[in-house]
Structures are given as C-alpha cells and as structure tokens.
Image: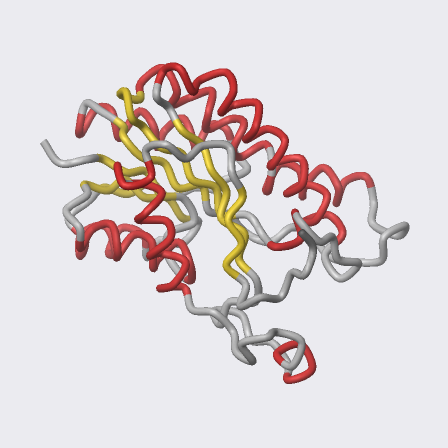
Amino acid sequence: MSQVAIITAASKGMGLACAEKLASEGYQLAILSRSSEIHDLASRLGGIAVQGSTDNIEDLSRLVDATLETYGQIDVVINNTGHPPKGDLLELTDAQWQEGLDLALMNVVRMARLVTAHMSSGGSIINISTFGAKEPSLSFPISSVARTALSAFTKLYATKFGADNLRMNNILPGFINSYPADQEIINQIPMLRQGTPEEVAELALFLASNKSEYITGQDFLIDGGLVKSI
C-alpha cells in the first residue's frame, strides 16, 4: 500500500505545497484546515479531509481517527500551522502567549501523543517551524520562543524513539513568498529573494522519504542564507 501522510494547515501556502508534492509522489493524504475548501482539495488530491484547527486537540484527534479508519496506517506527519500573535515583547498578554504556544508548540506535542503508537517503523514527523528558532526576532517574539522550545522537544523525541526508527525533524523557513516581504527585508537575504512554498515542499518530501532515514532530531534552515549564526 502507498505511504500515508497527515498534513495540517494544508489549504494554502507551505501546507498546500506539501500536500500537492506528496500527492504527486503517490502518498495517500489526510489533510486538515480551518477552511471549508479543504474538502475540495482532498477530492482533487484523492485524499480525505477534516475541517478543524491545529490548536484544538479534538480536531487533531478526529483527523488521526479518520486517517486510521480510512487507511489503517500513518507513515508521515507534516505539522504545519498558523502564525502566533505578534506584538511588543513586554506588551503581549498571557492569553496571547498561551495562544501562541498552543499553535506553534503544543500542536506538535499533541499530535505526537496521538500518532506515535500507530506509526510504522520508519515513520517520519516533520514540523514546519521558522528561522526564528535559530535567530530569535523581536518582530516575532512568541513564534521565536515557541519554535525554540519545539527544537528542544524534537531532540527529546528523537532520543526517545530513535531506536524504534521513528524520526522527527524541523524545517525552518525564512521569508517565503506566500506572505509578502518588503524590499528592506529582501535586501537582507543573501539570495536577494524570498523562498517559495514549493521549495519547502521539496525539503519536506526528502525528510518524509527513506532517503533521510538516518536523519532525526535536526533543524533544517531554508532561508536563502538569512541566518548567519553557526
């Protein structure tokens, strides 16, 4: 049987590109989005869909249950999500911090709880994170903090489940053109352009496949050289 992939926040941007790329490579899909358009996308890609949010444990549970009921297996999970609240570092409220942590950290923790026992040997979990995990930005304070914590969780998951041949890695995009950036930002990128969702999807496909079967617990920058830290 074909490999089965769960992809969240799959209706647009990087999530959509990942869904289209994996479908083109023969993966069977189970996809999630808040948008009702997710059902039309699933029909087009030959998969199944659940309408819901990545920060809602009940929606994630419905997605995993539907995947198992339809396909009987889970081989790949791509945890894409929305953007946490932005604002001044000390003016962001407790509620905004909690919202961001639910959206950008706990989504992965909860999904890992739901799927790990059902994933076959060689399973791969891929988290779409951000370059802020390596180089925190005051423009995205909650995202930077939550995604840095996600990197730590990913290391712990890799340590605990590596012997079971279950892998978890993070993709750290820079400025991707699904969200416009001004020229001042683009001038800071050594390649002098934004990335594309399709380029992110190519990396996700590699991390989903057995070509990356000895890679786990890692952060992969895809940012045109934006991050300078070593």
Which residue sits at x=26%, y=30%?
67
Which residue occupies the foreground of this view, 63 or 22? 22
Can residue 141 be seen at all in this image of the molecule? yes
All told, the count of numbered labels is 0
Which residue sits at x=36%, y=29%?
62
Query: Image quadrant for the N terminus?
Result: top left
Can residue 59 be seen at all in this image of the molecule? no
From the viewer's perspective, is residue 60 above or below residue 175? above
**Residue 115, position in %: x, y?**
38, 23
Which residue occupies the foreground of this view, 16 or 158? 158
58 relative position to 27: left or right: right
**Residue 174, position in %: x, y?**
57, 62
* Residue that sits furthest to the front in the current view: 230
58 relative position to 150: left or right: left
* Scheme by which the image is coloured: secondary structure
**Residue 79, position in %: x, y?**
45, 41
